[in-house]
Image (spheres, rainbow, N blue to C red):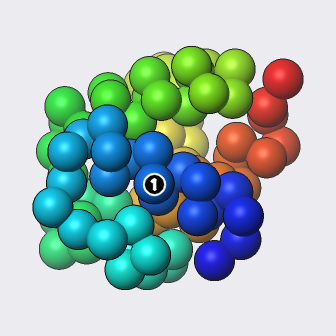
Amino acid sequence: MTPLETELSQLIVTRLELDLDPAAIDPAAPLFGEGLGLDSIGALEISLIISDQYGVKLSTENENVNEIFSSLRSLCAYVETHRA
């Protein structure tokens, strides 16, 4: 995992109170469905984490929102290119 992937996985596990080791998250695995099993509330929480920590706003109006949230790795790539 990259340093950002490690940091963001720790934030997600802590904020969403997931019963799992952040290091166990596969950065390429889906965040929703069979991956981490997150739902729309999880997506909203992750959006808030990213806004608070990195100053990056995520909106459902973004045409690539499904791609951005497809995995931890894609989420981190988006953050890296858009962070303040």
- Is residue 81 rendered to the left or right of residue 65? right
Which of the image's four quarters has the N terminus? bottom right
Expressed as whole percent of the image width and height from the top left, the position of residue 7 reads: 59, 54
Q: Secondary structure under badge 1? A: helix
Which residue is nearer to you in this view: 11 or 60?
A: 11
Q: Quadrant of residue 6?
A: bottom right
- Is residue 77 rendered to the left or right of residue 16? right
Expressed as whole percent of the image width and height from the top left, the position of residue 73 reads: 59, 66
Count up the numbered dots: 1
Q: Quadrant of residue 60?
A: top left
What residue did someone put label 1 on?
10
Identify which amino acid the numbered label 1 is placed on: Gln
Is 15 placed above or below 36 here? Answer: above
Residue shown at the point (61%, 62%) measured from the top left:
5
Q: Residues within 10 Å of mark 1 (few under 14, many from 20)?
A: some
Expressed as whole percent of the image width and height from the top left, the position of residue 21 reads: 31, 71
The reply to whether residue 56 is in sight is no
The reply to whether residue 64 is in sight is yes
Expressed as whole percent of the image width and height from the top left, the position of residue 36 reads: 24, 65
Is 28 placed above or below 72 here? Answer: below
Residue shown at the point (84%, 23%) measured from the top left:
84
Residue shown at the point (72%, 64%) measured from the top left:
3
- Is residue 80 rendered to the left or right of residue 13? right
- Is residue 68 rendered to the left or right of residue 31? right
